Amino acid sequence: MRQELFVSDEAVRPAFHFTPARNWMNDPNGLVWYDGEYHLFFQYNPLGSGWGNMSWGHAVSRDLLDWEELPVALEHTPTEAVFSGSVVVDRADTSGLGGDDSPAMVAVYTSHDLLTGHQGQSVAWSTDKGRTWTRHPKNPVLDIGSTDFRDPKVSWYAEGGYWVMAVALAIERVVRLYRSDDLLVWTHLSDFGPAGSVDGVWECPDLFPVAVDGDPARTRWLLVVSVQEGAPAGGSGTQYFVGDFDGTTFTADPSTEDVSWVDHGADYYAAVSFNDEPHGRRLLIAWMSNWDYARQVPTHPHRGAMSTPRAYELRTAGGRLVLAQTPVVEGLPGPVHQVTSQPVCDGVHPLPEDFRATSTVLTLELDPGTASRCGLHVRAGDGERTVVGYDAGERTLYVDRTRSGDTGFHPGFGAVHSAPLDLAAGEPLVLEIHVDTTSVEVYADGGRVVITDQVFPSPGSDGIALFAEGGNAHLRRLTSARAPAPGPAGRTGRARP
Ligand code: FRU
């Protein structure tokens, strides 16, 4: 039974994370909901499994879980690479590009000129639900003569009644804000940065309001910026700033910390948001990889996977606002296996056969007790395991992927990634862990501490074990909701037959 559920035709195909059927993928682009469909566009090489020939791939979903991959939306040309950007539904037809009965979906993306290296912002539109696209004759509509000016994120600023674009001046480590009434003519508003992490170039900025403490009446603004170097787990990562936007300028709160990271793992980059209109929430999806080794990742025929969609909100903690993330995996079944109340003595304790899974959502409540380290081994098998643990001495959550499977494709891949996690005396470790064929995403402290890491275990490494070191821990509860097999459309980018 288990075999039927979990064996896929390709051993490295995630069960509940989007991958294209084949070829290279990086950043999510143009996330938008329109008329019953979620659209995910993405940086895509239609011709191969390495970065290049950048185009916008396209997939649609009705539930954010099962995706149908459609033909490439925006193809590269001999002179233009289609870099990252965003899509809006122009309901009021501010651009005049809409059809008689249907508003235009308008894509604003970076045209990377392959002859000159210039990067400008261009427009394309679709009046058939994103199936076909027309490039605007005036492209690029925003050109400042720069070679590092990219990744426009456009949204409707309701208070002002105009469109706002956040776009990166990558080398300067600056996010530039523009406004427009028609998506075609853009006026410079202000600049933010350099600030926070400036070790690498800035890419994929996104500015949006978020609720504080779950109260939609109290909102602040988040500016999310990806950075190519210097993230906590090495290489690329995603930082954020909390502040206010007055229609012209984003002002970050003075922070006691130097840098705030969205995720402490190695594989969470280019996170961009979209309005989940049916549910009245804003979700983000990131590319689950790292520029340090993305080109060497050992999967075939696809290379690149997206994160689970996550809802971001701000919580008040210790007198300041911190980001909290809730993963969205609606459609996975409820808990199917559970163990409760048992001691976890010093050592490693494999769970029963029923728990074996290569794709599952685990929830864990574990009292660290006297253990110096405790937690779970996932994707465990013959000499392989990915350790998700709490270190009581260091007061950290960590993911150890040094023996997770294939780590040899890059010298930096086999490493331990950790994040500060303070448990009060007697407080249990409470984790939600999303294990999939080639990744783990670990949420602690109600989503305030997150580690996202790719792993490449053997397909047969499907064991789960509890462990304690240096003392005894106590399990309160562990549940496993295994991912069902993909439906006919696949969660995987396989096109419908
Ligand atoms: C981020 C990025 C973007 C660029 C795209 C090119 O990962 O470098 O800045 O638009 O990828 O594929």
Image (cartoon, helix red, strand yellow):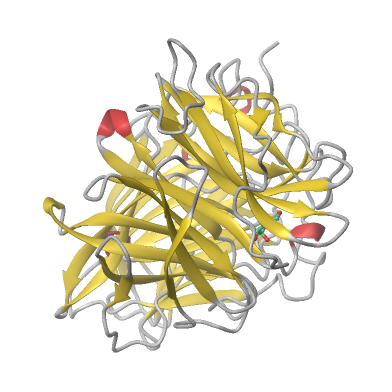
**108 or 37, which is in the foreground?**
108
Which quarter of the rendering shows the N terminus? top right
Expressed as whole percent of the image width and height from the top left, the position of residue 18 reads 59, 37
* Horizontal relation, residue 400 to residue 334: left or right: right
Q: Is residue 414 above or below residue 354?
A: below
Which residue is painted at 39% across and 44% down in the image?
181
* Horizontal relation, residue 115 to residue 199: left or right: right
Mark yes or no: residue 288 visible: yes
Which residue is painted at 43% across and 31% down in the image?
89
Which residue is painted at 73% across and 67% down in the image?
147
Which residue is painted at 45% across and 48% down in the image?
154
**234 or 399, which is in the foreground?**
234
Expressed as whole percent of the image width and height from the top left, the position of residue 401 reads 62, 67
Expressed as whole percent of the image width and height from the top left, the position of residue 445 reads 28, 65
Q: Is residue 344 above or below residue 98?
A: below
Mark yes or no: residue 350 visible: no
Expressed as whole percent of the image width and height from the top left, the position of residue 107 reads 56, 38
